[in-house]
Image (tube, helix red, strand yellow):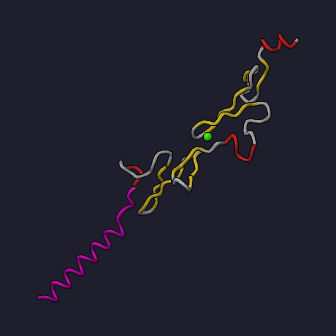
Amino acid sequence: MLLNIRIHFKIILWIIQIWCMSAEDIDECSKLGIPCRINEVCQNKNDTYSCQCKSGWEMDPDIHYCVDINECKINERNPCGEFLYCKNTPGSYICLCNIGFTMGGDNASCVRKLFFIQLLT
Ligand SMILES: [Ca+2]
């Protein structure tokens, strides 16, 4: 009798193990309540998930939170080029024209505002 119970228990355990191995991965990222914090993105993995900083954010090892990357000050290089002003924004940056200039038709270069051209000539 005891041997029968043990055999049945082992068979049930074996079935549970097979069922768990064949179960499809659960996409934890699509469920509500995933513990990724603000400015993090969830990545589903096989039987688990991970949280990583969104683009434009980086992990601050001191506070263990994703903080904005100041693209305008990376390597003291202006990503907007010589004639554009770089303005840091949360998760990104924008390029603006200096005073007296306005964005040209190519949206990448600045041209003098007409008012300043008239003053200078
Ligand atoms: Ca930024």
Is 53 positioned to the left or the right of 10 in the image?
right
The secondary structure that most of the magenta stretch takes on is helix
Q: Residue at x 70, y 46 (%)?
A: 74
58 part of magenta stretch: no
Q: Give the answer, above or below, for where 88 lies relative to 97.
A: below
Q: Residue at x 19, y 85 (%)?
A: 6
Residue at the extreme right: 121
| Magenta stretch, residue numbers | 1-26
21 part of magenta stretch: yes
Q: Residue at x 11, y 88 (%)?
A: 1
Q: Quadrant of residue 61?
A: bottom right
Is 81 positioned to the left or the right of 43 in the image?
right
Percent position of residue 71, x then y: 67, 42
Percent position of residue 110, x then y: 76, 25
For the C terminus, the quadrant is: top right
Percent position of residue 32, x then y: 36, 48
Q: Residue at x 86, y 13 (%)?
A: 120
Percent position of residue 44, x then y: 45, 56
